[in-house]
Amino acid sequence: MADVDSLELLLAAIREGQPRAVGRAISLVENSAIELPTMMKALAPAAGRAMVVGITGAPGVGKSTTIAALVAALRGKGHRVGVLAVDPSSPFTGGALLGDRVRMQQHALDGEVLIRSMATRGHLGGLSVAAPSALRVFDAAGCDVVIVETVGVGQSEVEIAGVADCAVVLLAPGAGDGIQAAKAGILEIGDVFVVNKSDREGAHAVVRELRTMISLGDRRPGDWKPPVLSLVAITEEGIPALMQALEAFRSDAESSGRWQQRRLAQARRQVESLLLARLRQHYTLERRNQIERLARAVRDGRLDVYSAAEELLDPG
Amino acid sequence: MADVDSLELLLAAIREGQPRAVGRAISLVENSAIELPTMMKALAPAAGRAMVVGITGAPGVGKSTTIAALVAALRGKGHRVGVLAVDPSSPFTGGALLGDRVRMQQHALDGEVLIRSMATRGHLGGLSVAAPSALRVFDAAGCDVVIVETVGVGQSEVEIAGVADCAVVLLAPGAGDGIQAAKAGILEIGDVFVVNKSDREGAHAVVRELRTMISLGDRRPGDWKPPVLSLVAITEEGIPALMQALEAFRSDAESSGRWQQRRLAQARRQVESLLLARLRQHYTLERRNQIERLARAVRDGRLDVYSAAEELLDPG
C-alpha cells in the first residue's frame, strides 16, 4: 500500500473517498493503532455530515438483504453510502465475512458504496469508541448515509442505539415475536421498526403486536412515535416506505432539537468510555496486585465485591 | 413482608432457602439498594458452592423449554435449583415475564426450585456486577445448580460467559445457522453447544457445521473441546446427554484448575466494573462540566474523542 504510506496521503485519499484508504483507516480503528489519535484529530472537522442509520436484529431476520436493498435505493437518489458491519468480534470471523454476503455483492464494484466490517474485540473503549471513530472515517470520505449493521439482540443493540442517528430494528415472523422483542429490550431503542418477510404467515400479527406495545410505551407529547413498517426485502417491497420513514425521522429530530441532543449524549458516552479505558491502562503494578488480591478474596468468599471496590477507592 | 423486615431476618430466611426472601434479595440487587453492600458482605462466606450454568441463544431457539427440562432432570437427582433470567432491561418487561413462561409453571409450586427474573438497567456496574450478586443469593439459599438465562446473542452473551461456570449455547435449525453463529461471536464463549429442535430439517447440518468450526478453533492440548449435542427439549430427548456433558465439563475444569481460574477472572472483572462505576459516581461538578464541554466539542467536530480523553486524564 505504497499509495497510503504516510498519514497525510491516507487522509487525502480518505477525503477523496477512495475505498482502499477507507479500508486502511478502519483497520487502524479496529486495531487501536498508534496513529489513531492523530488520524481522528485530523478527521474531526469533517464530522457530522452523514446520517448514521443503525440496523439491528436477530440472526436470520434478513439484515443483509435489507441493507442491500436500502443501499440500492440510496444509490438511486445519488447518495454516496457507507456500510459498516460491526462484529462482536470472533477470531473465527475476522473481517472476512462480508465477502460471503451474496446480497451485498451487487454493490461491490460501485465506487460510491464503501463497505467494511469491523471487529471490536480488544479496541480500547470497545464498540462505543471504535464504531463512532469508524463512522467518522466514512463521514470524512463523503458518505451521505452510513448504515451500521450489528448482529444479535441484547447489549450490542443498546450500544448501537448509542452510535446511530436513527436505530432501525428488524424483526421477522417466527424468528422472534412481540413478547420476545420485549424480552430482548429492543422496544425502547428502536426509532423505526421493520417487520421483514412480511409476506409470510404471522407477519401481520407481529406488526400488530409491536404497534400495541409501542403505543403502551412511555412517551411524552411531541416525542417521535416509532412506526412499524412491513417489508419484503428480497423483492424490495416496502423499501420506499422505509426511505420515507428515515427522512421523516430525520426532519422530526432536527426540528425538535433531538438530533443534536442525541449526538451530544453519544459524544459524552464516547469520551467517558475512552476515559475509563485509559484509566484502566494507567494502573500501576501495585494497583494491579491489589486488584488481584481482592479478586482472589472475592472468589474465595472472604470478601464481597462491594467491599473490594471500596478498598480500591479508599486505600486509607 | 413483615417477616423479612430487617436485614438479619432476611439473611436467615435466604439461608433457609425461602423463595420470598430470595426474591426480596434479588430485588435489592436489581435496584442497587442501599442495603446491598451489607447484604453481600454477609453472604460472601456462603459463596462458591453452586455450579452456575449459563444458557444463552437467540429468541425462538427454545431456551425456556430447555431450562424447564433441565430443571426437571436436576430435581430428579434431588438438587435444589435456582433459575435467574437476566433481562437486558426493558421498562416494558420489568420482572413479570417469567410468569408468562408456561413451561416453567410446572416448577412454580416446587419449593426446591427458585425462579427469578432480573432487569439490570441502572444497576451500578451493569450485568457484570448485578448477575454475580444475584447468583450469590441463590448460592446462599442452598442451590446446588443455578441456571442463568440470557436472551439474545451478542454482547450480553459475552457477559454471561463472564458469570457462568459453564456456558451453554443453544441453537436451532433455521433460527441461526453456523455462519450466523460465528458472526454473533458465540463460538469462543460456549463450553457446550446444544442444537435444539433437532428433529427438524437442517438440524444435522447445523450440528455438523458447528463441529467443523469448533475443530478449526484455536485450542491447546488439554483444553476442553466443546461438545455439540442434539436436543428435542419439548420431549426431553437429549436432556440426559446434556446433564452428562455438564458433569464432564465440571470434572474436567476442576481437575485442570480452570474452574478456579475462571472464577478468579470473573471476580477480577466484577471488582473492576464496580470500581469504574464508583469512580464515575465520584465525579465532581467541575469534572462533569468539563466532560460536558468536551463532549460538545467532539459532537461539533472541534475535537476528537482521543484528544478529549487526554485532556480529562491530564488537565495540566
Image: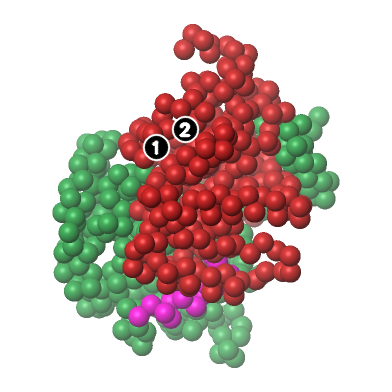
Chain colours: A green, B red
The residue under label 1 is B104
Q: Do labels 1 and 2 share a chain?
A: yes
- The residue under label 2 is which amino acid type? Ile
Q: Is residue B231 shown above or below B270?
A: below
Magenta stretch: dominant secondary structure: loop
Farthest residue, direction bottom: A2
The residue under label 2 is B115
- The residue under label 1 is which amino acid type? Met
Q: In this view, does B161 lie to the left or right of B314?
A: left
**In front here: A135 or B125?**
B125
Q: Is residue B11 left or right of residue B60?
A: right
Q: In this view, does B33 lie to the left or right of A302?
A: left
Q: Quadrant of the N terminus of chain A?
A: bottom right
Letter of the chain that mark 2 sits on in the rendering: B
Q: What stretch is highlighted in magenta?
A: A89-102
Give the image location of residue A163, x and y in percent. 43, 57
